[in-house]
Amino acid sequence: GHSARPPPSSLDPRQKNQNLIAALRSGLGDEGYQRFKALSTSFRNEEIGPTDYYIRYRELFRKRPASNGNSNGRSDDYDGSLAASLWADLVSLLPDFNKRQALWEVHHREVSKGNHLSGSAHVHARAGPQQEEYPGLPPSTSSSGRGGGVVVAVVVAAE
């Protein structure tokens, strides 16, 4: 047999890129994918910074309320598992090392505030778990006068 095909983990960047595009297309639809492309171009051309990119990327995965009205008007239909699973590939495929670094820093910062791409913020509302996930993070300094943890708890309770 000529089973000389590499295992999926060692996909070459081109193939990884194709897979990512396919996943984005099916997950976001054509319109969403076009928005994603425009967003990424803006980031590559440094028209927007990493934080903006991250926030808008997350927004892309918010499900638009169905026009036929059977979505009960819920605005929290958010495909977080897709957003989170595509993020790592997306960042790893960026040719620019500095931009990759910047995006991971934003990601870790958001996670430490409880804003997970996966949308499961309420699971991590307690201070702590995020340090185990990313050993490189400094201990969270929630004594910044805003009492970060408290705010999260209130938001969660209100959901």
Image: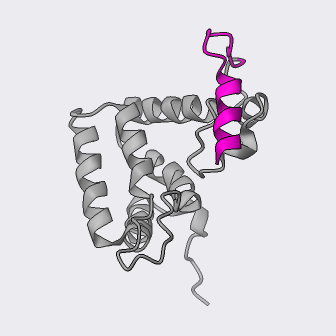
Does residue 92 show up magenta in the picture?
A: no
Asked if 117 appears above or below 61 in the picture, the reply is above
Q: Which residue is at a point 60% across and 52% down the rendered structure image?
A: 118
Q: 119 left or right of 122?
A: left
Between 153 and 80, the one nearer to me in the picture = 153
Does residue 158 show up magenta in the picture?
A: yes
| Residue 142 appears anywhere in the view | yes
Q: Which residue is at a point 36% across and 40% down the rendered structure image?
A: 53
Residue 80: quadrant of the picture: bottom right
Asked if 101 appears above or below 20 in the picture, the reply is above
| Residue 136 appears anywhere in the view | no
Q: In the rendering, at what x and y percent does residue 6 appear?
A: 57, 70
Segment tinted magenta in the rendering: 139-159
Between 119 and 157, the one nearer to me in the picture = 157
Asked if 56 appears above or below 74 in the picture, the reply is above
Q: In the rendering, at what x and y percent does residue 33 appear?
A: 31, 64
Q: Which residue is at a point 40% across and 71% down the rendered structure image?
A: 22
Asked if 133 appears above or below 105 in the picture, the reply is below
Q: In the rendering, at what x and y percent does residue 60 appear?
A: 39, 55
Q: 96 left or right of 118?
A: left
Q: Which residue is at a point 72% across and 18% down the rendered structure image?
A: 139
